[in-house]
């Protein structure tokens, strides 16, 4: 009897016959789905055996045993599958045929796991090599590859092997599973956001239908999935027998854990015992401690790191069990819902009765204690707290305890429901710290303007009442060994945030000073050099404002330092990962359109770069405070445009109408109507055209805040090509970020041009043609009319030209100051400390040389030292000279600034000796600490600041002469 | 004989053209009110913390603080006026507010609210007492009518 005869149900026999005779793919797939949906498990088993044997060429059904390329995976058609038994019948047909190969693959994979556990680099490389050559690609191996990329096991040969293997997962586009794995393990990305982002893709159906189940399993293994386990197994079956086997094992483990006995039995029965024996023999047990020793994660967050990578170690029972323990408590909360009770009592995490019991009694050290609350890490402590809250509501007794709790836990605002937050952080009258923390928790949890206002208000109250109006004093007060609460505040204190502390900081200068103080505090306590440098830039901007001495009147301006800082802080990790992915000759055509597909942008590096450029340009145009729209809104649309083109023009026009009334009624009527219409059109320009284009609000807006704009296509391609080279060549972050700023300006030129054209068009429409008006004029009136019209037309031209000038990039968009102006400001500052110092200043040479960019505070510092020394040791009423020489050489500008001060002749030798001694002394940490002062400080600058190349010293008669030599690259 | 001051008005406006139109209107109608004029969000917040007003005429696009010659630049806040409403909400105050803006919409919680709907939406969301939201145009009568209604009894 043929196998067909073993199928009991005649309908199923017919379905099988139908599939065998199917004339096209559609009929074939429909037939398979019918069998899966209607057959008994036994009939399905026979049916798939038949189809396997008799349909070798039907690529849509035949599952790959060990796919070698992504194409082989994608070639398997994904069908609906809801019946677990029938799906198992389908995949076990594969197991039966490739049992021996699966056993061998388990052994090689086991060797890989063991080599990672033992940190045996050669073993890892050899196992990867064997697996890739013999078995091709696998999701389980992919997880290990990404894990290795982010582990402490770093050596060149290993990284080369890993990168080479990963290439199999990037053709033609990066596999979405790979992108997810990288984001999960990249410490620069928030795990919570990544998880929610990808689950949103699953829910929205944005992913390839075969990827949905696996992506969900990687993110949230316990979350219900439409189609259930059967659909998940089908998704894994595309990846070959080995991945299917591992997933069946994982599913069986989960079924057993949650007492789903029938599912467990069915799954377990589907796995051949020979494969299970191989698993038991070759897959090593790995403890959480062993896993943690491979992680690069910061020590403090080691426990979280273990959880995050546990998705890639699901074959190890202890790690899977830990993952599920965490998922039991946090899984739904990670995904944005708040169950009243955990689905399972957590096995490892301690349950406590009071907030006090959650606190560490020793220094937090997740390396030595994973679960014991006296010193475990902040992530596991958070889980204990939440598991405890689910048993019994807990409450902080005051602000100090709330601070301690927030310091030793992580992401609480995101994990707790409103009721839980309210009961954990009760209100206490007159406890300003508690008010502040409560408002911070609410703001972090929900966002929204009202909570933002409450948060700022609570901060201002406590800083004004208890900390002498100094935010830094408050930061010092709340800081601790762990420092989460202080870091949270420091991280929130952006320029924008501080600008909105209206009661605390009442002028823009106070805002800048406060920002600089906070950055300085953060830089020194967290050893963050970038923050210290930003503090200096901030202070320098105050100096610059003094130099400029006026109110900034540039209409269209995007503050470069803040924009570049924004680029740095938002995309530095993307640049790092893109540097390894971008190819030398990327295909640029069409990028300005294709990037808008969020999934494609994740999978193709060049589109990811295009998406970053788009986000930068959006920020450039739309930043609430500093973006182009905000500036155009306040500086052009808001009265100024109408004021300049209509109001300012009105007196001239009224006088023209008055004159016209005397010579020609036609002309008078014409001009009155003209003015009404012109006024309306100018208003329309402001209300409809000089706007960000948006549907349905401003469909005629001329600014398109995206690179997805046909007129920008060539600028976009050019920008991406330059950015691609900068990132691939691993240029310094500042340089790459600067290119983004420059390219955003080039993109904006396209929008500006549209706006200027609109102005031209409007002007052309309202230029008055005198000929029809002259027809009925007498000879005397003709010349008068002509004169009036000429005057109107000329004035129109002048006003429109002025407005067109507003719509252009300002010549200088980076901080700029002439050396002489800086010298004057430095002298003024020094005189505040040395009021007796009133030298006669003499300047010579190229006084008009200006320095650009936010790094010239280094030169300012050097100048300050030299002028300060002159004040301390020189003649108070002597001469103080500055001489500037500048010369262009190759691609650089060489600038030499000589400062000469006068001393008493009898003191010259002594002064010179002191200076020489300082010039020869050990400079040590001159640049690192405040101890770096005087000459030592300048020598520190010479040693560490690229553009400051040397400091020369000499004496002449009664003069002390210093020269600072600098070389600035000339930007092409 | 000069009438006694009976009411108080806070004008939050940084555009001199607009301010002069508002002030001329108040002058023309001889409202018996003390006027406080501020030009930035910061000044407005301090003013409302200082005392209650019978009417607040509130622009939306405002600088964060006042720019000084030779000083740093304040932030340009397209919907800075919302901060004043948030502050009133926080203080649980029901001072009457007339929003007088040159923009057809107001950004709140990331969405654009048209001026015609701003009164209802912001009042329900913030619990403040906006009696009217108007687009400012010098010749337009509606804002003048609303101001006159609000100050009825003070002239």
Image (cartoon, grey):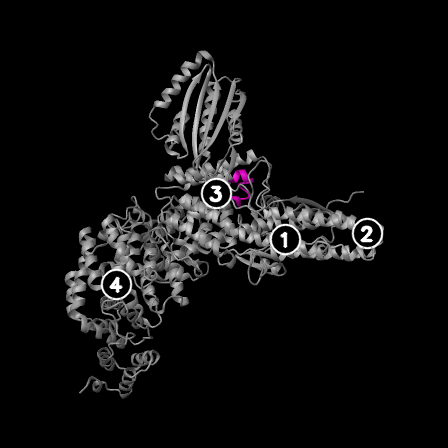
- Left or right side of A565 for A62: left
Which is more N-terminal, label 2 or label 3?
3
Rendering coords of residue A741 (x, y %)? 47, 47
Which is more N-terminal, label 1 or label 2?
1
* Label 4 sits on residue: A138
Q: Is residue A503 magenta?
A: yes
What range of the chain is rendered magenta? A498-511
Q: Nearer the viewer, residue A1 or A789?
A: A789
Rendering coords of residue B61 (x, y %)? 60, 50
* Label 1 sits on residue: A759
* Label 3 sits on residue: A561
Between the residue at mark 1 and the residue at mark 4, the CA separation in whole angstroms equals 60 Å
Between the residue at mark 3 and the residue at mark 2, the CA separation in whole angstroms equals 58 Å
Q: Is residue A391 visible?
A: yes
Marks 1/3 in contact by CB < 8 Å: the verdict is: no
Dot 4: element: loop
- Left or right side of B17 for A142: left
Between the residue at mark 1 and the residue at mark 3, the CA separation in whole angstroms equals 31 Å
The residue at the point 18 percent across, 55 percent down is: A126
Same chain for marks 1 and 3? yes
Q: Is residue A611 magenta?
A: no
Q: Chain of mark 1?
A: A
């Amino acid at each position: 009897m043929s196998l067909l005869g073993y199928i009991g149900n005649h309908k199923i026999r017919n379905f099988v016959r139908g599939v065998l005779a199917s004339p096209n793919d559609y009929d074939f797939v429909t037939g398979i789905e019918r069998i899966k949906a209607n057959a008994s498990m036994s009939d399905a088993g026979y049916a798939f055996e038949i189809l396997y044997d008799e349909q070798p060429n039907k690529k849509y059904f035949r599952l790959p045993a060990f796919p070698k390329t992504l194409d082989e995976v994608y070639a398997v058609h994904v069908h609906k599958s809801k019946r677990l038994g029938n799906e198992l019948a389908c995949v076990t047909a594969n197991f039966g045929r490739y049992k021996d190969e699966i056993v061998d693959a388990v052994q090689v994979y086991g060797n890989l796991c063991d080599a990672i556990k033992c940190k045996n680099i050669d073993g890892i490389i050899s196992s990867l090599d064997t697996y890739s050559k013999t078995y091709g690609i696998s999701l389980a191996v992919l997880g290990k590859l990404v894990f290795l990329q982010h582990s402490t096991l770093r050596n060149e040969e290993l990284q080369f092997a890993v990168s080479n293997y990963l290439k199999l997962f990037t053709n033609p586009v990066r596999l979405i599973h790979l992108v997810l794995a990288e984001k999960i393990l990249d410490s620069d990305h928030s795990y919570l956001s990544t998880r929610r982002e990808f689950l949103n893709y699953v829910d929205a159906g944005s992913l390839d239908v075969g990827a949905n189940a696996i992506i969900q399993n990687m993110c949230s293994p316990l979350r219900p999935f439409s189609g259930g386990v059967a659909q998940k197994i089908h998704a894994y079956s595309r990846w070959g027998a080995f991945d299917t086997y591992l997933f069946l094992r994982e599913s069986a483990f989960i079924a057993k854990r949650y007492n789903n006995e029938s599912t467990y039995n069915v799954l377990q029965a589907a796995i051949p015992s020979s494969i299970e024996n191989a698993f038991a023999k070759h897959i090593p047990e790995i403890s959480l401690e062993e896993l943690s020793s491979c992680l690069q994660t910061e020590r403090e967050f080691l426990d979280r790191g273990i959880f995050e990578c546990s998705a890639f170690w699901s074959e190890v029972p202890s790690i899977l069990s830990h993952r599920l323990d965490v998922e039991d408590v946090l899984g739904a909360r990670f995904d944005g819902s708040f169950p009243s009770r955990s689905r399972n009592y957590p096995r490892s995490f301690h349950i406590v009765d009071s907030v006090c019991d959650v606190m560490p009694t020793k220094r937090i050290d997740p390396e030595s204690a994973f679960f014991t609350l006296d010193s475990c890490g902040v992530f596991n402590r958070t889980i204990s707290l939440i598991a405890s809250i689910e048993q019994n509501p807990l409450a902080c007794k005051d602000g100090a305890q709330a601070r301690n709790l927030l310091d030793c836990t992580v992401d609480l605002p995101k994990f707790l429901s409103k009721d839980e937050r309210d009961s954990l952080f009760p209100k206490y009258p007159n406890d300003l710290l508690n008010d502040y923390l409560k408002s911070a928790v609410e703001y972090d949890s929900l966002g929204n303007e009202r909570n933002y206002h409450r948060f700022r208000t609570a901060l201002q109250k406590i800083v004004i009442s208890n900390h002498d109006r100094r935010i830094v004093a408050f930061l010092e007060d709340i800081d601790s060994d762990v420092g989460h609460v202080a870091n949270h505040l420091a991280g929130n204190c952006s320029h924008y945030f501080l600008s909105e502390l209206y009661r605390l900081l009442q002028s823009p200068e106070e805002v800048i000073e406060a920002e600089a103080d906070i950055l300085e505090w953060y830089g020194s306590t967290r050893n963050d050099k970038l923050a210290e440098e930003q503090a200096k830039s901030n202070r320098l901007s105050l100096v610059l404002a003094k130099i400029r001495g006026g109110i900034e009147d540039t209409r269209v301006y995007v503050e470069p330092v803040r924009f570049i800082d924004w680029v740095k802080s938002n995309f530095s990790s993307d640049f790092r990962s893109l540097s390894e992915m971008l190819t030398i000759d990327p295909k640029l055509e069409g990028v300005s359109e294709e990037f808008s597909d969020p999934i494609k942008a994740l999978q193709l590096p060049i589109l990811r770069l295009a998406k970053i450029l788009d986000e930068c340009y959006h920020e450039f145009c739309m930043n609430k405070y500093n973006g182009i729209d905000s500036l155009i809104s306040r500086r052009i649309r808001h009265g100024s445009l109408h004021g300049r083109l209509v109001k300012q023009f009105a007196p001239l026009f009224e006088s023209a109408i008055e004159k016209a009334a005397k010579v020609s009624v036609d002309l008078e009527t014409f001009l009155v109507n003209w003015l009404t219409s012109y006024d309306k059109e100018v208003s329309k320009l402001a209300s409809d055209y000089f706007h960000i284009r948006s549907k349905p609000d401003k469909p005629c807006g001329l600014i398109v805040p995206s690179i997805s704009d046909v007129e920008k296509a060539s600028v976009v391609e050019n920008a991406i090509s330059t950015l691609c080279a900068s990132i691939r060549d691993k240029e310094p972050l500042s340089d790459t970020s600067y290119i983004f700023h420059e390219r955003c300006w080039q993109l904006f030129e396209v929008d500006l041009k549209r706006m200027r054209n609109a102005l031209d068009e409007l002007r052309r429409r309202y230029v008055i043609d005198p000929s029809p008006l002259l027809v009925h004029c007498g000879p005397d009136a003709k010349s008068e009319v002509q004169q009036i019209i000429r005057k109107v037309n000329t004035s129109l031209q002048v006003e429109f030209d002025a407005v067109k000038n507003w719509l252009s990039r300002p010549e200088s968009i980076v901080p700029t100051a002439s050396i002489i102006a800086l010298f004057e400001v430095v002298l003024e500052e020094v005189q505040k400390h040395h009021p007796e110092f009133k030298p006669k200043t003499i300047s010579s040479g190229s006084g008009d040389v200006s320095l650009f960019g936010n790094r010239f505070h280094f030169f300012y510092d050097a100048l300050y030292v030299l002028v300060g020394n002159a004040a301390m040791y020189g003649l108070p009423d002597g001469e103080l000279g500055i001489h500037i020489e500048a010369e262009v050489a190759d691609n650089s500008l060489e600038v030499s600034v000589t400062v000469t001060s006068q001393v008493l002749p009898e003191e010259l030798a002594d002064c010179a000796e002191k200076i020489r001694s300082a010039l020869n002394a050990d400079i040590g940490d001159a640049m690192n600490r405040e101890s770096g002062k005087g000459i030592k400080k300048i020598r520190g600058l010479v040693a560490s600041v690229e553009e400051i190349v040397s400091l020369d010293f000499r004496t002449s008669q009664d003069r002390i002469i210093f020269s600072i030599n600098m070389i600035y690259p000339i930007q092409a | 004989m000069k009438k006694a001051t009976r009411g108080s008005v806070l004008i939050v406006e940084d555009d001199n053209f607009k301010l002069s139109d508002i002030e001329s209107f108040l002058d023309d109608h001889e409202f018996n009110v003390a006027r406080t004029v501020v030009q930035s969000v910061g000044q407005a917040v301090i003013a409302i913390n200082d005392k209650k007003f019978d009417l607040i005429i509130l622009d939306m696009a405002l600088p964060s603080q006042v720019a000084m010659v030779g000083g740093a630049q304040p932030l340009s806040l397209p919907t800075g006026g919302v901060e004043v409403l948030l502050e009133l909400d926080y203080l649980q105050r029901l001072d009457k507010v007339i929003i007088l803006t040159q923009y057809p919409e107001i950004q709140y919680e990331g969405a654009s609210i048209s001026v015609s709907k701003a009164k209802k939406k912001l009042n329900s969301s913030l619990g403040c007492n906006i009696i009217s939201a108007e687009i400012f145009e010098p010749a337009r009568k509606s804002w003048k009518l609303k101001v006159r209604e609000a100050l009825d009894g003070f002239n």
